[in-house]
Image (cartoon, grey):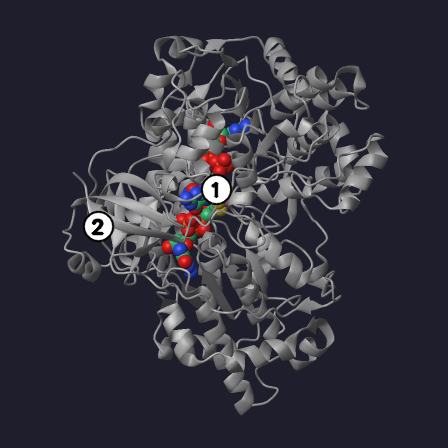
Amino acid sequence: MNADHNPMHEKPSADQVNAQLAQPPEEPAATQGEASQYAAGIPAILKTFEFGLGQMGAVNSLKAFLKVNKKDGFDCQGCAWPSPDGTRHIAEFCENGAKAMASEATTRRVTPEFFKQWSIEQLAEQSDYWLNEQGRLTHPMIRRPGATHYEPIEWDEAFACLATELNRLASPDEATFYTSGKVTNEAAFLYQLFVRQFGTNNLPDCSNLCHESSGTALMESIGIGKGTATLHDFDLADLIVIIGQNPGTNHPRMMTALEHAKRHGAKMIAINPLPEVSLRRVKNPNPQEYSNPLAWASDLFGEGVALSDLLIQVRINGDLAILKGIMKEMLEEEDRRPGQVFDREFIRAHTAGFDDFIADLRRTSWDEIVEGSGVPLDQIRAAGQMAAGSKRMICCWAMGLTQHKNAVETIQQVINLLLLGGHIGKPGAGACCVRGHSNVQGDRTMGIWEQVPPEFLDALEREFHFSPPRRNGYAAVDTIRAMHAHEIKVFVGLGGNFLSASPDTTYTAEAMQRCRLTAQVSTKLNRGHLITGQQALILPCIGRSEKDRRPTGEQFVTVEDSMGVISSSRGMLEPASPHLLSEPAIVAGLAKATLGANSTVDWDALGADYNLIRDRIARVIPGFDNFNERIRKDIFYLPNAARDRTFVTRTGKANFVAAAITHHTMASGEFLMTTIRSHDQFNTTIYGLDDRYRGIYGGRHVIFLNPEDIKEAGLSVNQWVDITSHFEGEKRVACRFQVVPYQIPRRCAATYYPETNVLVPVRSVAERCNQPTSKSIRITLTPSR
Ligand SMILES: Nc1nc2c(c(=O)[nH]1)N[C@H]1C(S)=C(S)[C@@H](COP(=O)(O)OP(=O)(O)OC[C@H]3O[C@@H](n4cnc5c(=O)[nH]c(N)nc54)[C@H](O)[C@@H]3O)O[C@H]1N2
Ligand SMILES: Nc1nc2c(c(=O)[nH]1)N[C@H]1C(S)=C(S)[C@@H](COP(=O)(O)OP(=O)(O)OC[C@H]3O[C@@H](n4cnc5c(=O)[nH]c(N)nc54)[C@H](O)[C@@H]3O)O[C@H]1N2
Ligand SMILES: [Mo]
C-alpha cells in the first residue's frame, strides 16, 4: 500500500474529469441572520409541509406522511432513531424525516434525455444541491470508456458488463463492495453472501466513517458493539448526558424522548463545542399534536421546555479530559461518602480493571483535566455532582465523539462513567450509541463487515455449502488507498456517495478514477456518479417509500434501529420509473451474472421472494428464529447480552479502560476544525442552503470562529479565507470560506461536511479502528485572493 504518497503532487490523468471537480463548486455568499431560539415547534411543521408539497405534491405527501414509521407502513429513510414499541401516532415523523421522504418521493426525474443533454463534466460543475434537485434516476446508465456522456443500457447488459469486469480480475480481492446504511436487511444479507461467494471480504461501509470507533470501544468494554438503552429507558432516566450530538437536526424524533424525560423530572447535561439550540430548548416536537388548535396556541405563546441543565462548551476533542474530570469528581464524592456514589456491588460482580482505572484517575491532576478540556473547574465539578447523584443515567453520543484520533478511548470513558454507577443493564439507564443511517446497525448484523467474526462465516458455510474467504477485507480508508495504488480495480457501491462521504476528496477522486469500473446502485444523482473509473454504471433502484413488486408478489423488507429493534417496512407509492429494480433484485441479478453455475445459491428465487431470504437469515444469524412468522406479527428486539449484564469480553466482565488525555499544542495561527451537518442536509445530500438553527442562510461555504480569534488573526467578519490543513508535513487547501463569528471555544473552528472533506487527510485515522478523523483537523487560514 502506498503509505507515503503525498496527494498534493499527483496529477489526474488527462482523459478523465479533473479531480478538482470532485469538490462541490462555490456557492453564493451566506448571510448570518437570527438563529432559532428553540428546536421543533411551528417553524418545523411549516418546513415539513413546504418540502413535502414542493417535491412530492399533495397526494403523495399525504400518503407518505400517513404511512411513515407505521407498523403497516415504511421505515423513515432518515435516521436510526427508534419508533415507539406500542401504539404509534398519526404522524410519526419529523421535519428532517419529511425532507428525506420528499427527496425520495420527488416528482422530478433524471432521464436518459437529461444525460444526453448534460455531459459528465458539465454536471460535475454543478453544486451538490443542484444535483439532488434534478430528481430520481429512471434508467440504468453506462459511461463507456472515454465517453463524455452517460447512455442508457439494458439491465441484463449492465449485469453482464459488471460480471465480465469482476471475472477478469486476477483475484476477487481486486474488487470492493461498499454499502451505505440505508440498505435494508434483506438486500444487505444477499449482498454480503454474493460478495463472499465471489471470494472477498472487501466490504467497506459507511460505518467505517461513522460509528466504527463506537463499535470497537463497546466490544472491548461490554462485549457487544451496540448500545444498551431502549426508548422506554428515556421515560425512566433521572439524568441524560448528550455528548457530541445535535439531535434537533440529526435525530429530531429524539426530541420527543427528551421532552418527555424532562417533563418526568430528568436532568440533562450536554457536552458540545457549539451551543446547539436543540440542546437548549424544544417546543412541541410531535407533529401529531398540531391537529389540536390548543397546540398552536401553546406553541405561539408558550416557552417550550428547557433542556440542558448544564451545557458545557468543551473544546474540540476535549471530551476525554472532561469525562475524566466528571469521574474524578464522582471519586472525590465517593471518598467523602463511601458506598453512596459508586455501585460497589455491580462493580464487584460485573466489572474488571476497576482498581487500575481508579489509580489512574487519582493520578490525573485537575490542572491537566481543565487544560485538556478547556472547561472551567466549577462546571466540571457541577457535572460530576449531577452524575454522582444519578441513580439512572443514560449517555448518548454520536459523531462529536467518534471522528477523532482518540475516539475509541474517549467512548470507553463514557462506558466507564456508566459502569461506576452500575448504569448498564438496569431500567432507565444505559449506553445510547445514536446511529446515523436508518439501517446502518442492521447492515452490520447482516454481515456487512470487512472483518466479520469466524462464527458468522462458519454459519454461512454450513447454510450455503461454500468456503467463505477468511482473510479480513479492506475497510473504507484502506479501500481508497488500495484503489489509489491500483490494487483494487472495480468499485461497486450499494447506496451512498462514497466519493463525497470519504476523507481527502481529491485523493479519493484519483483513486476512483484509477478503477476500471465504478458501479453504483442509487436513487438520486450525486457527485460519485461524475468522478468515475474508465467505465461507470448507474444502477437505479426503488426507494423505501415505493411498492416493491417481484414475480411472487409485493414484498416487504426489514430494518434494525439504533436500539436493536427489528421492524418491517412496506412502500406504498408507485415506483419513480417502471425501469427501476429493487436492491435485492439488483444484487441477485448481479450475483447470477457473475457467479453463474458455480454458485450454490438459487439467486432468482431469493431475488423474487424475500421470505426465502428471511428464512436463510433466520438460520444464519442468532436472534432471528422464526423471522418471517414473528415479523408479520410485530416488531421484535434482538438479543443484547449486555442488557442482561452478561459481558462477552476477554475477561468475561465489563472492562474499565484507563486512558491518557490528549493535549493539542497549537502553533500560533492554528485552529482545530470540526466538520458538521447543517439543518438542511442529509450527509452528502443537500436539501437547501440554510441552517436556521444556527442562523446561517443562503450558503454553506462558511467557517465558524470565535470572535476573539477573528480579531486576533486580523480577519474580519464575512471575509473570505482559504483553509489549509496540516498533517505530517502534508498540506491540503480548500478555497473561499466566509468567516462567521460564533460562540465556539477559542482556537476551535467548524465547517460543513462534505465541502471540507478535501482537508481530511486519508492517513489521519482513529487509533485501532481506522476511522477518518473528520472532527479534529488542524488548520491555518489565509485571506482568499
Ligand atoms: N437531517 C439529518 N439527519 C441525519 C443526518 C443528516 O446528515 N441530516 N445524518 C445521519 C447520520 S449518517 C449520522 S452518523 C447522524 C449524525 O448526527 P450527529 O452526530 O448529531 O451529526 P454532526 O453534525 O456530525 O455532529 C454532531 C455534533 O457534534 C458536535 N461536535 C463536533 N466536534 C465535537 C467534539 O470534539 N466534541 C463534542 N463533544 N462535540 C463535537 C457538533 O457541534 C455537533 O453538534 O445523523 C443522522 N441523521
Ligand atoms: N467530513 C466528514 N465526513 C463524513 C462525516 C462527517 O461528519 N464529516 N460523516 C460520515 C458519516 S457518519 C457517514 S454515515 C457517511 C455517509 O456516507 P454515505 O452513506 O455514503 O452517503 P449519503 O450522503 O448518505 O448517500 C447519499 C446517496 O445515497 C443514495 N441513496 C439514497 N437512498 C437510497 C436507497 O434507498 N437505496 C440506494 N441504493 N441508494 C440510495 C442516493 O443516490 C444519494 O445520493 O459520511 C461520512 N463522512
Ligand atoms: Mo453516519
Q: Residue at x 54, y 13 (%)?
A: 578
Q: Position of residue 378 (x, y in %)?
A: 36, 79
Image mark for residue 4: 1
Give the residue type that dot 2 points to: Val
Asked whether residue 586 appears in the rendered view, the answer is: yes
Side (left or right) of 34 relative to 405: left
Give the residue type that dot 1 points to: Asp
Q: Residue at x 62, y 50 (%)?
A: 85
Picture layout, residue 297 above or below residue 392: above
Q: Position of residue 264 (x, y in %)?
A: 49, 67
| Quadrant that contains the C terminus | top left
Q: Position of residue 432 (x, y in %)?
A: 56, 58
Residue at the extreme bottom: 336
Image mark for residue 730: none
- The picture quadrant where one finds residue 658 is bottom right
Q: Residues within 10 Å of mark 1 (few under 14, many from 20)?
A: few
| Quadrant that contains the N terminus | top right
In this view of the protein, which residue sits in the foreground, 93 or 494?
A: 494
Q: Position of residue 484 (x, y in %)?
A: 50, 31
- The picture quadrant where one finds residue 596 is top right
Q: Residue at x 41, y 50 (%)?
A: 728
Real-space Cα separation, disc 2 to disc 1, in angstroms: 36 Å
Q: Residues within 10 Å of mark 2 (few under 14, many from 20)?
A: many
In this view of the protein, which residue sits in the foreground, 293 or 170?
A: 170
Q: Earlier in the sequence, mark 2 or mark 1?
A: 1
Q: Which residue is mark 2?
A: 740
Q: Residue at x 52, y 71 (%)?
A: 238
Q: Considering the numbered disc 1 on the image, is that residue within a helix, a strand or a loop?
A: loop
